[in-house]
Image (tube, helix red, strand yellow):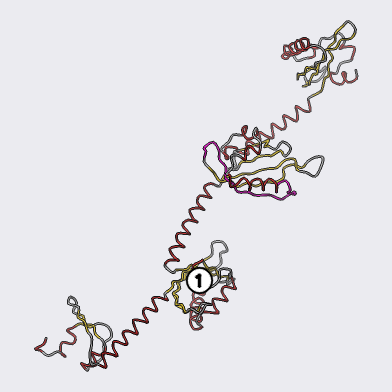
Amino acid sequence: MRAVEMCFGYDASELQNTHIRALVHPEERPAINHLLGHLITSGLDVTVRGTFHLLHRTARPFPAELSSSLQTIGRHRYVMLSIRDMSEHVRQERKIKRVLHTLNRIMRTIPEAVLIYEVAKCRFVYAGNAHVLGWNSIKITRTSFDELCSFIHPADIGRMTNCMEEALKLTEGETSTCIFRMRGKQESWRWYYSRVAIFRHCSDGPGVEQLLWVIDDITTLMEERSAREQLHKRIELATRGAGIGVWEINLRRMMLIWDETMYMLHGIAPEVQGKALLRQWQRYIHREHLQAIVSKVRTLYRQRQGQCVVTYDFITPAGERKHFRAIAHLTQSPSTEELCLIGIVVDETLLIEQRQQQQKLQHLLEESQRMARMASWEIDPDSLLLTATNELWHILKVPPVQGSIHLHSYREHIHPGDV
């Protein structure tokens, strides 16, 4: 009776011969009549439950759960009532609803999906901004984690499973990340980046009760990245076929960066990088050419702008002699804001060798003509420009001329009858 007195504020004597309907809020009395009718038709040893607002003597109506059962004592049947005050439970539910309402408003201002995963239930119990995944919140919270994995790209299921296993081993402050593809209602694969952290620990042990998942749609970013990689491959194939390498060096830290073509042209292993690469390049370059390059780089560094063009000879580690032309531009690194040289290297070995071969042939031709007292010459009929070997000038006993001259310049040396 003491419990009834505390619950309703009435004395036990005041509640005697009082119908239960009198203790229920007037708007809910039809519902209590339905509960009693259902109890009578259900028979003995059956418990019927319902939640109602009961009237307190001095305070406001309070929510309570009624558990009723029908019992027979002697010749009479009695309704046995168990009343549990639900006020605190309702307050907690309202508090949770307010928190969820606030959280939903926050979700509208961020682009990521925020999900809460219940470890014991093996499913998500909250899904904010679920449209990012191409789903709705109710669908996600009603679907188990294994069922959701069936919508993940087959190549990424193992990655997602590993991410979940790592997340269960996290400590406070740590996160686990994962990139995966998932298919939503549009039936098209989209890329997502997820970050997982501990949301709540178990109250009765060191385990994890809930995990927080923050998922961002990175499809556009991945498509742009793929396009850049394809463009880079095409440029790399084009430059490699043309014998053009791309390089960069940080002038403060002296860190040298080469692309694959540079390694191939210079015959150096790709594993050699940074300062070790710079030392190896300096080891095999022609000493005089290296000094000229250093001088030009120092001039650029003092001017803080400009570009330079240099040529240098290089002996590869395998002993092959190469001739290169380098074009460099001084700029500021966008990431570190430090000065660096960015440029290309063109392999001119074949061109130099062809030029040297032509010079040798030209020399042999002139020597043979000199010995035979013969000369070769050519006159362009349109411009009347005369081009000849040195032997012609020796035969004519006139000073040698470099390049081409106009025919009228030597008209005075030609017999008038032959003009």
Number of numbered discs on residues = 1
Quarter residue 207 falls in: top right
Question: Could you say whether the residue bearing mark 1 is in a helix, strand or loop?
Answer: loop
Q: Position of residue 7 (x, y in %)?
A: 84, 20
Q: Is residue 212 magenta?
A: no
At horizontal 75% and vertical 49% (from top left) the residue drawn is 171
Position of 236 with respect to 372 (left or right) is right
Q: Residue furthest top?
A: 75
Quarter residue 22 falls in: top right
Residue bearing mark 1: 304
Q: Nearer the viewer, residue 311 or 27?
A: 311
Q: Residue furthest left?
A: 417
- The relative height of residue 337 versus residue 137 in the rendered view (above or below) is below
Q: Position of residue 349 (x, y in %)?
A: 42, 76
Quarter residue 24 falls in: top right
At horizontal 31% and vertical 85% (from top left) the residue drawn is 362
At horizontal 17% and vertical 84% (from top left) the residue drawn is 408
Position of 65 with respect to 329 (left or right) is right
Q: Nearer the viewer, residue 345 or 189?
A: 189
State the extent of the magenta-drawn residues as a range: 166-187
Q: Is residue 173 magenta?
A: yes
Quadrant including the N terminus? top right
Q: Position of residue 347 (x, y in %)?
A: 44, 73
Q: Looking at numbered disc 1 in the image, what kind of residue is underneath it? A: Arg
- The relative height of residue 144 versus residue 369 in the rendered view (above or below) is above
- The relative height of residue 278 versus residue 221 in the rendered view (above or below) is below
Q: Nearer the viewer, residue 377 or 225?
A: 377
